[in-house]
Amino acid sequence: MEDWHNSPDNSSSESITSAPFFDGLPEAAIEKATAHVVMRSHPANQVILLENDWGSSVYFILTGWVKIRTYNLDGKEVTLNILGKGELFGEMAPLDEVPRSTDVITLAPTAIGNMPAQDFVQLLNHEPQAGVRLAQLMARRLRQVNRRLRLRESDSTSRVSDILLFLAEGQGKRSLRGIEIPNLPHRELSSLSGLARETVTRVLSKLEKKGLIERDRDTLCIPDPHALERLML
């Protein structure tokens, strides 16, 4: 069961307005855009959006993780992206006014702020900086996809390393140990990289033995991202 409540609750309002998308926007514009946001909590492995759902909302992740997936011509699941706190998704469907082309599933207990699509579009129409922020988001995601496509013919170590760096760039948190990302199930890394799960497991073990990554139950740490990047040259 999902729990929900409206955003005027102070803690919820502060959570969504702290998303990087709102950085630098006028306070009055943010308040207006988030006035009708509804907060929902979802358990792990719950489908939030299905392909072909209409774009009635834009979604901001407050806590937790989701994956964006689709299917190839053979019916095999393909993970396109993994998003965490501060990210948004579902932003293109309201602009195109067409059904969504992907599914969204939680990877962990996740809290999400649902913003009505018309409020999001109105924000873009009235605040040029919001449009710039959206363009920057789209450019970053396109750059990440292009990099992954270029590596599709590379060796397995390069491809797994790239996925780890991709996740670190989008959701990594700096600590004294390095950059930390969630220690995701190997099947998710397999789907992102296009490699067999057994291959991903083997590569991760090799990277760990070389000291390029450190793992515990919940976290994967990259002590030196540049060292990991050098494997891809």
Image: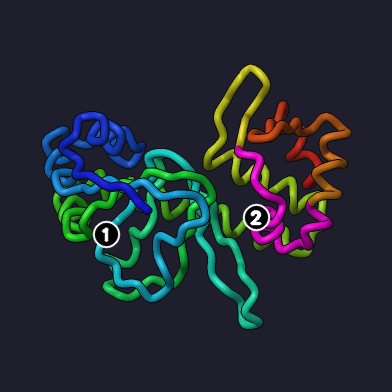
Q: State which tag comes first along the sequence, 2 or 1.
A: 1
| 195 in the magenta segment | yes
Task: State the scheme by which the image is colored.
Answer: rainbow
User: Magenta part of the protein: which range?
Assistant: 182-200
Q: Position of residue 44 (x, y in %)?
A: 50, 50
Residue occupying the point 15% across, 55% down:
122
Left/right of residue 117 with respect to residue 167 in the rendered view: left
Find residue 205 and report its image quarter: top right
Q: Is residue 96 magenta?
A: no
Q: Residue under circle 1? A: 57
Q: Secondary structure at mark 1?
A: strand
Return the x and y of residue 42 as percentages of the image width and height: 40, 50
User: Which residue is identified by label 2?
Assistant: 188
Q: Looking at numbered disc 2 in the image, what kind of residue is underneath it?
A: Glu
Q: Residue at x 27, y 59 (%)?
A: 57
Q: Quadrant of residue 210?
A: top right
Q: Position of residue 194 (x, y in %)?
A: 71, 63
Label 2 SS = helix
Which of the two residues, 78 or 43, is positioned nearer the viewer here?
43
Image position of 37 with respect to 117: above or below: above
Instruction: Locate residue 141, reporting x and y percent.
Output: 49, 54
